[in-house]
Amino acid sequence: MSKPSEPGNIVLVGFMAAGKSTVGRELERLCGYRFVDLDNVVVQMAGCSIPEIFAEEGEGRFRELETQALKSLAGSRGRVIATGGGVIGRVENWAQMRSLGPVVYLRTTWATLRKRLANSQGRPLADPKELTRVEALWRSRLQLYEQADISVDTDELDAAKVADAILRQLHIAQGNTQCSND
Ligand code: S3P
């Protein structure tokens, strides 16, 4: 993990609907790190949406693009990076994420995720009509998420409180905008 005083970047991991983007934006507001959504990087690289990539080229191709997108961030500083929920599945992604900065797991119970995912759209692996399957996917990933450097239990907290807890654990000052213009 990077030195607390020089975090470089903050990398958020967690299951779909764990709040990575919302918390990422909150971190941007609080500490000035610029928000990057890894799914958006993939979409820009591919020139089409995530559901289109899955439908036309399959999950394997999406995973390749996701790894490529992560690699494209090498050398970045002062970013808060929200990853897609499945990024934790490849060992090489972990090496890449750790080289960017501390990896932070947004830990969320299935009860909370279930409610959010019941209305989810645009997530090929989270069909609201197949929540039993989605729960099995969540369960199969839990140990992988736990490999993060730090974790925050998010169920009882709003996004601002989660962001605050992250910054405290990483010893990053709020209002610190020194990296935002890199
Ligand atoms: C996925 C999560 C999605 C997106 C893709 C696959 C997953 O991102 O990367 O649909 O495998 O969990 P979010 O976690 O932002 O929904």
Image (cartoon, grey):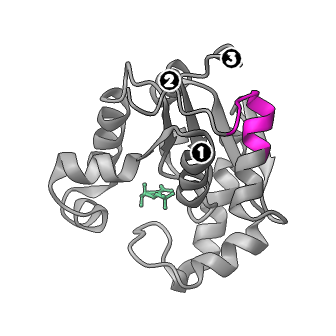
> Which amino acid does the dot numbered 3 rest on?
Ser
- Of 24 and 12, nearer the camera is 24
Q: CA distance from mark 1 to mark 2?
A: 13 Å
In percent of width and height, residue 37 lies at 41, 49
**Mark 1 or mark 3: which comes first in sequence?**
3
At 75% from the left and 65% from the top, the residue drawn is 158
Residue type beneath disc 1: Val
Estimate how packed mark 3 is, as few (under 14), some (14 to 19) or many (20 or more) residues with alpha carbons within 10 Å: few
Looking at the image, is 125 positioned above or below residue 42?
below
Which span of residues is magenta-colored?
165-174
Q: Which mark is residue 13?
A: 1
What secondary structure is found at the residue carrying circle 1?
strand
Q: Whole-Å distance between the Cαs marked 2 and 3?
A: 14 Å
Marker count (numbered):
3
Q: Which residue is mark 3?
A: 5
Residue 106 included in the magenta stretch of the image: no
As drawn, the residue found furthest toward the top would be 3
Q: Nearer the viewer, mark 1 or mark 2?
A: 2
- The residue identified by callout 2 is 100
